[in-house]
Image: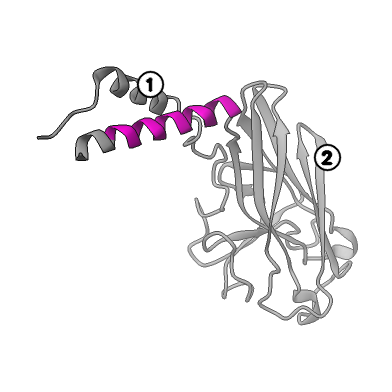
Amino acid sequence: MKILAHPARTALVSLALCGLAPIAQAAIVTNGSFEIGAPVGGCTAGATTVSGWTVSSGNVDIIAAPVCVPEAGADGTYFLDLTGSFGAGGGVIFQDLATPVGTQFNLSFYFGANPGWQYLSFPNDSPVKSLQVLLNNTIAGQFSQDTTGRAAGNAGWIQESILFNATSDTTRLTFRSLNSANGTVFGPYLDGVSVTAVPEPATLGLLGLGLAGLGFARRRKTH
């Protein structure tokens, strides 16, 4: 005979599962992998518009292998070289995010570097490619890679992360290339930008309670 779980326990499990919504919250960045509105032909050199983002200084290259560069993206097909083309200087992009005050968020992104200066006859400033991350116009991190001796096709992708607490309901997330001298067209690569809320300890406890309740209900039904 199949024994059903007690209604009170079932209600407890349901309430616990209702509290799991913040854990499953979707990323709040629009077009973090730069696939939306990406160029059909494979690349856009010197782009001043990127879907979901504002290019506030210089320009950027929206690129994909193998049309523009031999390096492949870290998260999907397309990615950005934050130092664009035509000697416009280091590019700066930003996006305003909805961030409830007091909530902790995890920002993650893939950072790479363009090694093409070693193989192509275009201006370059330095073998070291760097970018800054700003939150509400305050520097939250700076990242660099030395591309000396790096083979073509090796972007050197590294997934970086920054934890931050929201101090306003809107947070401006900015990425800034630090490679701009000498008319360079080789800069830092960016891909896979994501910002997600970090579950609070109470929510994690609720998750454990919900899973324990599910296990109990399952045992009662299968005995």
| Relative to 196, 94 lies left or right | right
In the rendered view, would you say 185 is above or below 96? below
Tell me the quadrant of the picture where the N terminus can be found: top left
Query: What is the magenta range?
Result: 201-217
Q: Name the residue under label 2.
A: 139
Specify which label sits upstream in the sequence, 1 or 2: 1
- Label 2 is placed on what type of residue? Ile
| Relative to 76, 2 lies left or right | left
Q: Nearer the viewer, residue 111 or 13?
A: 13
Tell me the quadrant of the picture where the C terminus can be found: top left
Q: Which colour scheme is used?
A: one colour
Name which quarter of the figure residue 121 lies in: bottom right
- Label 1 is placed on what type of residue? Leu
Element marked by disc 1: helix
In the rendered view, would you say 12 is above or below 171? above
Name which quarter of the figure residue 70 lies in: bottom right
In the rendered view, would you say 20 is above or below 51? above
Q: Main SS type for the magenta part?
A: helix
Q: Nearer the viewer, residue 46 or 212?
A: 212
Q: How many marks?
A: 2
Q: Is residue 197 in view from this perspective?
A: yes
Q: Mark 1 points at which residue?
A: 15
Residue drawn 66% across the image and 42% down it: 107
Return the x and y of residue 57 as percentages of the image width and height.
77, 46
In the rendered view, would you say 66 is above or below 139? below
Residue drawn 85% across the image and 63% down it: 183
Q: Nearer the viewer, residue 170 or 119?
A: 170
Return the x and y of residue 215 as percentages of the image width and height.
34, 37
Residue drawn 70% across the image and 38% down it: 173
